[in-house]
Image (tube, rainbow, N blue to C red):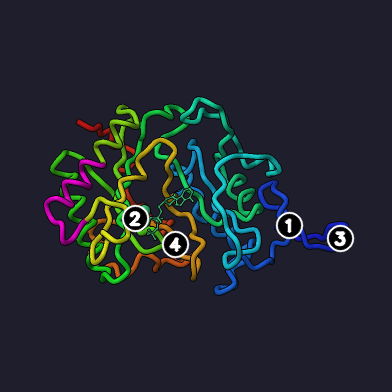
Amino acid sequence: GVSITDEEGEEVAERVGVRLTSPHRVVFPDQGVTKAQLVDYYSEVVEAMLPHVGNRPLSLVRCPQGRTKHCFFQKHDTGGFPDQLLSRAIAEKDGEKKDYFHVEDLAGLVAGTQMNVLEWHIWGSRFDDVEKPDRLVFDIDPDEALDFSAITSAAIDIRDRLADLGLKSFPMVSGGKGIHVIVPLKPQAEWPAAKTFCKDFAQAMADDEPDRFTANISKARRKGRLFIDYLRNERGSTAISPWSVRSRGGAPVAVPVEWDEVPGLKSANGFSLAAAAERAKDKTWSNYFRLRQVLK
Ligand code: ATP
Ligand code: MN
Ligand code: MN
C-alpha cells in the first residue's frame, strides 16, 4: 500500500482499489491498532473468512471515533459507502424492501474498515435462499460470575445433544464472553421451523438442568446460569462472523476452534489479531462446508 496525502494534507492510502483515509488513525486505543493494521488483518484471513461472511445480508458495528467512543449497529445501506461494500435489496418482515450490505472479496472488507466497521455480523441465511437458514447458532451467554469451564462444558453438552439428533456442530469463541455452537445446514427448513427447533432445544436443556441453563433472556433468570441464546435463529437476526474482530477491549477476534481444544480454553477473547491471523493459515472446521444436514 502506497501512502499519499490528499488536498488537505491528510494521509490517504489505497488497498485493493479502495481509498483508505487516515490509515494510521488508531481505532483500538488500548492496543494502538490502526485502520491500516485492521486492513492487514483482513488481508490475512480473507480466504478463511469469505466462505462464512460472503453472500449474506450483514449488520455492521461501526465506530467512527474508534472503539472506545460511540458505536452503533448499521443494518441498511443508506448511502455514502465505498462502492466495494456491496448492497442488495431484500424484503423486511412487513414486505418492504431494504438494502442490506454484503461483501464478496477483500475490497469489501477494506471498504467496511474504511467506514470504521469494527464488527461484521451475519444473517444465518444466504441471498440465494434467504428464507432458509444454512446455519444455526447456539450462543452461550453466561452469567458474569461463572467460571469459563462452565461455558466449555455447556458447549460440549450442546454438541452431544445435537449429535443425538444427528447434527454435527462446530465451536467458535465469540471474542466476547461466550462460545457459539454452530450447526451448518442444507437450506431446507424455513426460518419459523428453525426457530422452533432451536427454542425447543434450548428449553429442553433448561428443563433437564435448571440449575445450569436457562432459555429465558431475562438477566434475573441467568443468576449463576448460562442463557442458551437461541434467538439468533430468526429471520433478520445476526451473529458475529467467524474471523471478525470485536469492538471490545484487546481487539479480540471471533475464532473457529476444534472440539478437542474446547476443554482447554480459558476465555472467549483470547485470540488477538496476530494470533487469529496465524490460526487462519491452518484449516479448521474441515468438513463444515461439505455437510448437507437437515432438521428432522
Ligand atoms: P458474547 O460472547 O460476549 O455474548 P456475542 O457475539 O455472542 O458475544 P451477544 O451480546 O450475545 O454477543 O449478542 C448476540 C448477537 O446479537 C450479536 O452478535 C449481534 O449479532 C446481535 N445484536 C446484539 N445487539 C444488537 C443490535 N443492537 N442490533 C442488531 N443486532 C444486535
Ligand atoms: Mn453471546
Ligand atoms: Mn446472545
Amino acid type assigned to the residue bearing label 1 in the image: Thr
Judge depth for marks 1 and 4 and give the one in front.
Answer: 1
Q: CA distance from mark 2 to mark 4?
A: 12 Å
Badge 2 residue CB within 8 Å of ligand 1? no
- What crowding class fits label 2: few (fewer than 14 Cα within 10 Å), some (14-19), or many (20 or more)? many
Question: Which residue: 23% across, 66% down?
Answer: 224
Give the magenta-colored segment's residue range: 199-213
Q: CA distance from mark 1 to mark 4?
A: 25 Å
- What crowding class fits label 3: few (fewer than 14 Cα within 10 Å), some (14-19), or many (20 or more)? few
Amino acid type assigned to the residue bearing label 4 in the image: Ala
Q: Main secondary structure of the magenta part?
A: helix
Q: CA distance from mark 3 to mark 2?
A: 44 Å
- Name the N-terminal-most of marks 3 and 4: 3
Question: Which residue: 42% across, 27% down?
Answer: 129
Pointer 3: what residue?
A: 8
Describe the element under mark 3 as helix, strand or loop: loop
Pointer 4: what residue?
A: 276
Amino acid type assigned to the residue bearing label 3 in the image: Glu
Question: Which residue: 40% across, 66% down?
Answer: 269
Pointer 2: what residue?
A: 172
Describe the element under mark 1 as helix, strand or loop: strand
